[in-house]
Amino acid sequence: MIGFQSMDKLLRNIPLLSAAFAFVLAQFLKPMISLVLGNGWKWRYLTTTGGMPSSHSAATAALTVSVGMTKGLASTEFAICVFLSLVIMNDAMNVRYETGKQAEVLNKWSAILSSLHANSQISPTSFKTMIGHSAIQVIAGAILGLTVGSIHTYLRVFRG
């Protein structure tokens, strides 16, 4: 069971809070960016994966820069964060992005098959297509995370 002291320590974990702030900010920015781009306010963007900016990239970049600032660039913790951030960003750009593209094709084929077999039990399936990120979405998320992590850590550690 988490006691008051443990919860207090958790809430003072600057790298963790930096990552959480960056993630929440990125998620909040997604529907705002959609609105600015003329696509309307999309409430579902507050809780969905994919889109601009990448919240996973923002969180991992914020975590990495905050750990670098608090533990040092030569620390094992920083090395772990850098490596895992690169893996997560690569996954978002490549694996999850391609999965979304494959879902688009499957959705088209599902619609074609259901229309060809209108009298059968086949019904169209709709797979989620906004799963991954383009390179610009990942870069935007990383820049957001680096900014949030740097500012938050600076204000909490160096400005006390």
Image (spheres, grey):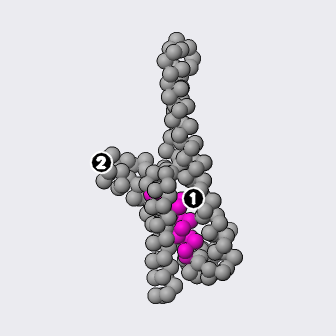
Of residues 70 and 91, the one drawn nearer to the viewer in this rendering? 91
Compared to residue 130, the image places residue 29 above or below, namely below
Q: Residue at x 45, y 61 (%)?
A: 140
- Residue 73: x percent and y percent? 62, 80
What kind of residue is marked 2? Gly
Looking at the rendered image, the disc whose residue lies closer to the viewer, 2 or 1, is 1
* Residue at mark 2 to residue at mark 1: CA–CA distance: 27 Å
Q: Is residue 88 magenta?
A: no
| Visible residue check, residue 55 | no
* Few, some or many residues within 10 Å of mark 2 (<14, 14–19, 20+): few
User: In this rendering, would 37 be left or right of 131?
Assistant: left
Q: Residue at x 49, y 44 (%)?
A: 130
Q: Give the image quarter of residue 61.
A: bottom right
User: In this rendering, would 156 be left or right of 79?
Assistant: left
Label 1, on which residue? 89
- Residue 92: x percent and y percent? 56, 53
